[in-house]
Amino acid sequence: MSKKRYLITSALPYANGPLHLGHLAGAYLPADIYARYCRLKKRDTLYICGSDEHGVPIMIRARSEGVPPQEIVDRYHFMNEKSFRKFGMSFDYYGRTSSPVHHQTSQDFFRTLARKNLFVLKTDKQLYDPEAKMFLADRFVRGTCPVCGYEDAYGDQCEQCGSSLSPADLINPRSAITDAEPVLKESTHWYLPLAKFQPKLEKWISGHPEWRPNVRGQIQSWFSNGLKDRAVTRDLPWGVALPEDVAQAAGVDANGKVLYVWFDAPIGYISATKEWAAKKGEPELWKEYWQNPDTNLIHFIGKDNIVFHCLIFPAMLMGHGDYVLPENVPANEFLNIKGLKFSTSRGIALWVEDFLEKYPADSLRYSLAISMPETRDADFSWEDFQAKHNNELADILGNFVNRTFIFVRNYFGGKLPHLGELDDLDQQLIDRLVQGKEKVGRAIDEFQFKEATRQFMDVARFANKYFNDQEPWSTRKNNPEKCATTLNLCTQTAYSLAILMNPILPFTSAKIWKMLHLPDESDRANWEDIGTLPLEEGHSIEDIEILFQKIPEKVIKAEIENMRKLSEGGPEKAETKPAFLSFDEFRKMQLRTARVLSAEKVKGTDKLMKLRIEVGEEERQIVAGIAQHYSPKEMVGKTIIIVANLQPAKIRGIESNGMLLAVNDGDTLALVQPDRDVPSGKPVS
């Protein structure tokens, strides 16, 4: 018997840096496709995510910047939430593990396990930094991985090979805070006895032969080696505090002790669901999704999180006893840049925010979906991105929809023409829509998102061929009734494609829905409508727009060159000293004063502002990335410094003749300006 509810989660991203494309391809895009599909199937669906704000990387970043950890998590929580929104993520709730509800939920969960005497208390020697005068959590220890020899592995996991580690496993360990050699010092901690849970975990996993082989293979390797007790508390100044009553009962000082981040982070799914329910005004509703056996709990993660979601968190849930266990954990492998793994810590990444400033979100979604690293690592390349955008989204999907709607507008007054008698090719088109619905749906239900994307594009490809084969430009003159039938079916197909593509291309789906002059697709769209020809004769088509503008070759060549520099420079690139500039080279640069005459934000962007400026007796236009730091109103009248002889460039289709100078420290931006009033057009020397 199928279960009633679908509770979908994506791994909580660390709030210690911006999102990159590897994040999207791993845990987020597949989950969003699945959630959107479930809603179209009219399933009771809840999609939960949020920021993991207690990871040691956050403390490392905070220490490096000299700010409190809360300032770091506030910055990246809102930044990442915004990036997710621009990418089209359809979370029902996006929470935070620094919230009071989460702290309370995690502490209550810990208390329940403690009352059941499930923890093992151990006093042993832990690594301690004598210079920082603090115990070192796993991620505060770096060293050489004993499995693959990677020299910068963390104390809990190797980023290079994905092996689960402990600080004691590392060769030549060192403090990530001061680089000092750690010493051993006694400390008492609570351990989750995973070895006792192994028989129960093995039985549970054996009941899920449908799980991906990469997931089952990694789990089996841990079973073969034998599960070991895992510490679930840490000596840290940042995190969910160890419940004092539990510590007192054990005769341990709770001061300075917190819950291990991988104990509290998955509980973040539960606490976020509680906050969602409270926001809806039904505070007990969360239990229907977490404690009712009619729930399908699906965790979408990357392969580096398999141990936590398939062994540690399930053991915690089993130990508690009141919660459902996951039905599936479809973990993706890594997305690489030309064979280099995306890594925030190593500075190898294509950042989501920057990417979406230049390219449509749906183009990125499609490119990632059709080459998703489902069972093995995949590579991102700019050439492939351009080919997918130009040759498939623009030339197949966009071309079909655009010429269908233009034809209806130009020759049928923008009204859906009459559907007459069907020929064999007409029936084939309808059959392909129905088959596409079944094939795409089955692939998504089986977590085969690459296959689902290919099947969708095959339907669009057939529709495009159908338009060509029926030759409406000819039948318009010699067989008007057949032409009307062809265009009716093409319009109905656009309707079906809008639903079929919605999980993968939500923004494009919404555009088609709008051109079809239909209500919001979330209220109307139903997966079962695909192939049913629901539009009535006379239905109007309005506000036609091109779905995908082609990406020029020169734009991609520039991106490829940037990637080449990244690949060659790697993580050491930032440490390379810049080459000196000769005086003659410097003299070629013309820096001049300019006065801002008018300013306006560039539509569809967050950062860009278009300025009309006066440079002496000349007026020109420039585009600058200052809109997040200055309003158009406050820019008017300012005297700025520009590079006046910079080669003109087009930014988002707008010509820019010059570049203004500003100081950017990563968080704030300040214009370079004269300290007193000077005329425009004056040289800067």
Image (cartoon, grey):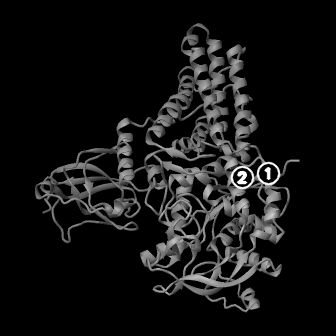
Q: Nearer the viewer, mark 2 or mark 1?
A: 2
Q: Residue furthest left?
A: 584
Q: Is residue 591 left or right of residue 239?
A: left
* In front of the other: 278 or 340: 340
Quadrant hosting residue 586: bottom left
Residue marked by disc 2:
216
Q: Which residue is mark 1?
A: 208
The disc placed on residue 12 is: none
User: Do we see residue 543 in this rendering?
Assistant: yes
Quadrant including the C terminus: bottom left
The amino acid sitting under disc 1 is His
Q: Position of residue 654 (x, y in %)?
A: 34, 44
Give the amino acid at mark 2: Arg
Disc 2 and disc 1 in contact, CB within 8 angstroms:
yes
Q: Nearer the viewer, residue 157 or 299?
A: 157
Of the numbered discs 2 and 1, the one sitting upstream in the chain is 1
Q: Is residue 285 visible?
A: no
Quarter location, residue 665: bottom left
Q: Nearer the viewer, residue 101 or 560?
A: 560
Residue 464, x across and y down, in percent: 58, 24
Residue visible at 12% across and 56% down in the picture: 587
Crowdedness near tag 2: few (<14), some (14–19) or many (≥20) residues, C-alpha within 10 Å: some
Give 430 or 391, whichever is nearer the viewer.
Answer: 391
Give x and y (percent) for residue 102. Answer: 68, 73
Which residue sits furthest top?
478
The kind of secondary structure element at disc 2 is helix
Residue at 56%, 18% in the rendered image = 468
Lateral position of residue 587 relative to residue 3, left or right: left
Q: SS at mark 1? A: loop
**Mark 2 vs mark 1, CA separation in Å:** 9 Å
